[in-house]
Image: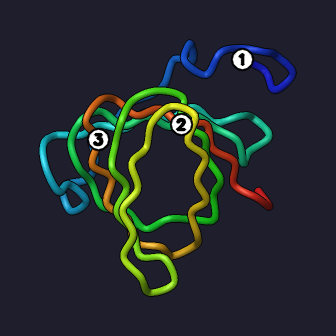
Amino acid sequence: MSDHSITRALDLALDYESVAPDQVVDGSPRTGLWEAESGGLGVWEMTPGAMRDVEVDEFFVVVSGEATLERQVEGVSETSELRPGMVCRLFEGEETVWRVRSALRKVYWIPGS
């Protein structure tokens, strides 16, 4: 898909890979990714399981699936339920744990990319 096309985020074919063993918290999660040619915009999906990550500055909208996102926000632990339509902001260096119950797909934007 070119950057000038219109498509449904749910229809994009993603390239999947296993989550690195040191990031796996539970199960055998895999992640899939599609990135726009111009950068900064993409679609990410995670299959059921749990993984830890360190984030970059990012805004995202959940388009399918269900998960729990555990994170540290300004020194305070926060847990959020993620479902289609939820909008979230992640911050550079934030430590997170993604606990996915049904494959979670999000459209993300990284400012300044």
* Sequence order check, earlier mark of 1 and 2: 1
Q: Nearer the viewer, residue 20 or 105?
A: 105
* Sequence order check, earlier mark of 3 and 2: 2
Task: Locate the C terminus by quadrant.
Answer: bottom right
Image position of 95 with respect to 34: above or below? below
The residue at the point 47 percent across, 73 percent down is 94
Image quadrant where residue 102 sits? top left
Quick one: label 2, few (<14), some, or many (20+) residues within 10 Å? Answer: many
| Cα separation between marks 1 and 2 | 20 Å
| Cα separation between marks 3 and 1 | 27 Å
Give left or right: position of 71 versus 86.
left
- Assign a secondary structure to mark 2: strand
- Residue found farthest to the left: 27
Give left or right: position of 113 versus 108.
right
Q: Are marks 3 and 2 in contact (CB under 8 Å)?
A: no
Q: Which mark is residue 27?
A: none
Q: Amino acid at mark 2?
A: Val
Image quadrant where residue 7 sits? top right
Q: Nearer the viewer, residue 2 or 84?
A: 84
- Assign a secondary structure to mark 3: strand
Give left or right: position of 37 versus 14.
right
Q: How far across and how far down the image is residue 12, in percent? A: 57, 18
The residue at the point 76 percent across, 58 percent down is 111
Image quadrant where residue 92 sits? bottom right
The residue wearing badge 2 is: 62
* Sequence order check, earlier mark of 3 and 1: 1
The residue wearing badge 3 is: 100
Q: How far across and how far down the image is residue 22, in percent? A: 20, 62
The residue at the point 71 percent across, 34 percent down is 36
